Amino acid sequence: MTTSAPVRVVPAPRELTTQPRFSDKVFRTVVTIGGLSSLLILGLIAIFLAYRGYEVLRQEGFKFLTSSDWSISVDDAGNVVDSTFGLAAMLVGTILCSIVAVAIALPISVFSALFLNFYAPGWLKKILIAVIDMMAAFPSILFGIWGFLVLMPSVEYWAKLLNNYFGFLPFLKLEPYVVTRSPFVAGVVLAIMIIPIVTSVAREIFSQAPLDRIQAAYALGATRWAMIKAVVIPHGKSGVIGGAMLGLGRAMGETVAVYSVLNIVFQVNWQVLLGAGGNVASLIILKFGEASPYEIKALMAAGLVLFLLTLVVNAIADLIVRGTGKSGR
Amino acid sequence: MNESHESENKKMETTTPSSLADVANAKVQKAPGTRAMGTGLETRGIHAWFGKNHVLSDVNLDFAAGTVTALIGPSGCGKSTFIRTINRMHEFIPGAAMAGEVLLDGKDVYAPGTDVTKIRLQIGMVFQKPNPFPSMTIGENVLSGLKLSQQKVSNKDELLEECLVRAGLWNEVKDRLGAHGGSLSGGQQQRLCIARALAVRPQVLLMDEPCSALDPGSTLRIEETIRELSDTMTIIIVTHNMQQAARVSDYTGFFLSEGGPGQMIEAAPTSEIFSRPRDTRTENYVTGRFG
């Protein structure tokens, strides 16, 4: 033993196993089903849309995304004589409306979240949170009707004002001069609808700003606003972007409210203030009632495109959140 | 006191207090209040509450300019609450209330119409857990107080170097001032926080157990820093480490809560507290009989 060098055998790592209890197995099954069900439902919807829309997508090809014509002629027997389907105008409208919505909702939401967390007295905070949560549960058709009857006349005033002073910007041009039922109006209605969700995400992330850093800032003679700039905003930046993207997704999918205020026109329009536009979801609701079976397939294809667009936006949001997430934490 | 512990306590009495007193006596005693750095800080009848819970009762303690005062006592005796009333950090806790006066150069920091941010510039604070701003670089962290309080300085680089040198961190970070504050070790982060507190040139520096999360080496560095800083400012340090109190402080205040709100039992020159405390409760604590 003393003469020969000891041979050290390095063992292979053991396989670690455990025998879960019965109760744990049951619980694991329940939560697994819960966790996978949303994935399953989403997958089934995607498959359904792809299956129903496949024929039209093959017929139209890439033109489905780039052209703006949406017409179908049917003979008396109900056979399709001629059809062209193109989503370009609707896709542009979807993006335009939701960007306007986020551009308006984001600052309002961030400021109200900061107010709720750092300025509002306790009793007011409780009331405001209840009101904002209630706003999230408010039926969108009511937002739409209110937007149409009440908001539109005053938004028109703001639209004219914007056009007057910032008309040189291409997207704020107004040719021809039609201001009613524009993507801008729809965006304002959508903004009101997504404020609650963006606010509650922002409020949650701001409230998690680390107390020791908040105290450090105050102890260095910071005013409340200086503390917020130095500690709370860097901490919450990525979460707020995530919340804004959640709101963007919601705005892109919104149907009824947009349908009631927007003038749906099958022509690509990048002018936010001009009374012509559309969005994919409102197209579906506009055409669905009187559509022939073949047109319904086209609408399903449109639904699939909207679905994929939302996925892409969420994926981008995820990338942004990851990119900015680390620095402030 | 339990009979069986009597002999043990006797033994401790003969060793511990004398050694701590030796440490305290070995320091050069300062004559307080002789420097031109303001007349110091006085607290008058400080009480503190959290909601209905009375946590601190009638603390009267003076801090002469240019001295280091250690506050010792068992956990929950109100030491931290007390120093947080001094720079008005106490009021951030919901439901917190206080009574009494904190006089900085004779002026009550709680007087109506006082700009609380100015008070906190004059009375800086270092916390128990190092808390640099992770989104800022080392350099930005040091100068963050100026930005936060919207002050402008012309000689930023000089100030940066001066503060880091005084906090004993300059040599370790001078080549990577652009690195993030979070990339430093715990002890370095704490010295960075001290440098950050120095940059706004406070008259008084409050330290709330600044070494409790640090290793002995870092602790030693910070204690050296405290000794050096006391040439230019008044320092109040809360500590659980009695050796530390003996090593760094000129004066020591002993706090205790006996069921009710915390009280200051005794305050005296540090050597006296550790060699011949007047109150038996102080003696019991410094000799390690409880706490």
Image (spheres, coloured by chain):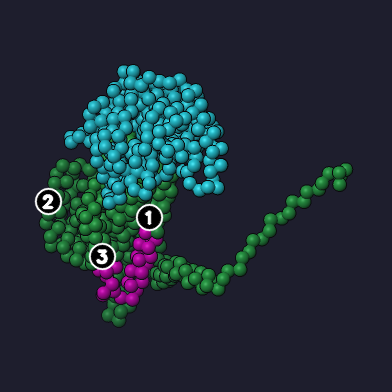
Chain colours: A green, B cyan
Label 1 neighbourhood size at 10 Å, few (<14), some (14-19), many (20+)? some
> Which residue is tagged 2?
A157
Check the image and report above or below for A18 versus B265. Answer: below
Residue toward you, B9 or A72: B9
Check the image and report above or below for B124 versus A35. Answer: above
Label 3 neighbourhood size at 10 Å, few (<14), some (14-19), many (20+)? few
Which circle's residue, 1 or 3, is located before the other in the chain? 3
C-alpha gap between disc 3 and disc 2: 29 Å
Q: Chain of mark 1?
A: A
Residue B107 sits in quarter:
top left
> Which residue is tagged 1?
A313
Q: Is residue A209 visible in this depiction of the protein?
A: yes
Which circle's residue, 2 or 1, is located before the other in the chain? 2
Task: Identify which residue is drawn at 54% across, 33% down.
Answer: B14
> Which residue is tagged 3?
A137
Q: Amino acid at mark 2?
A: Tyr
Check the image and report above or below for A191 versus A290. Answer: above
Residue occupying the far bottom of the picture: A77
Q: On the picture, is A144 further left or further right than B133? A: left
Check the image and report above or below for B51 versus A285. Answer: above
Determine the secondary structure under disc 1: helix
